[in-house]
Amino acid sequence: MTEAQREAPKGDAVLTRIGQAVMLHRGGDREEARNRLAALWQEIERDGAPFHRCALAHYLADTQDDPLDELIWHLRALAAADGLTGALAPRAFFPSLHLNVATGYLKLGQKEAARGQLALARAAAGALGEDPYGDGVRAAILRLTLALEGAVED
């Protein structure tokens, strides 16, 4: 078994449970999604694969009502991604992860911290592909850049 397979094997139960909770969230049941994801976090927080912790924290951020809680989960996702190695190293995820943290800081009025994270997102953007995902992240980086420069209300 490769290191990548040990980190996040295809068809594993954790990813299935994350996916089920995400479907609940997208279906409008934010509270139940948050509850399920939080319960799963309790199970894998210490010993879970970094890929699982990254994905789980990312989706938990999306279910938060408080901007500070959202930022905390985005920071946890970024920290978990730092632990990934091998084939699953998410170089192409780092621009989005840094962008999420930057957006969180901006929501809290911490513009300098937001600028720092945005700079990291820009620096990592070279790993993005020329595809819809990459195009979307690059567009979001531009929007946040404009918002921080005062050209756009965010």
Image (tube, rainbow, N blue to C red):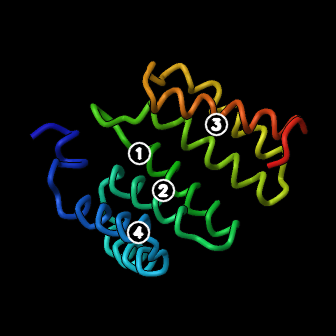
> Residue type at mark 2?
His
| Mark 1 to mark 4 CA distance (whole Å) | 31 Å
Q: Please tell me whether mark 3 or mark 4 is closer to you in this view.
A: 4
User: Which residue is located at x 48 percent, y 56 percent?
Assistant: 58
Label annotation for residue 135: none
Is tag 1's residue or tag 2's residue first in the polypeptide sequence? 2
Label 3 SS: helix
Q: Would you say 68 lies left or right of 4 here?
A: right
Q: Which residue is situated farthest in the left direction here?
A: 1
| Mark 1 to mark 3 CA distance (whole Å) | 25 Å
Tell me the residue that label 2 is attached to.
58
Q: Please tell me whether mark 1 or mark 2 is closer to you in this view.
A: 2
Tell me the residue that label 3 is attached to.
140
Q: Residues within 10 Å of mark 3 (few under 14, many from 20)?
A: some
Q: Is residue 38 above or below residue 99?
A: below
Q: Is residue 27 above or below residue 131?
A: below
Residue 126 locus on image (x, y percent):
53, 19
| Mark 3 to mark 4 CA distance (whole Å) | 24 Å
Q: Please tell me whether mark 1 or mark 4 is closer to you in this view.
A: 4
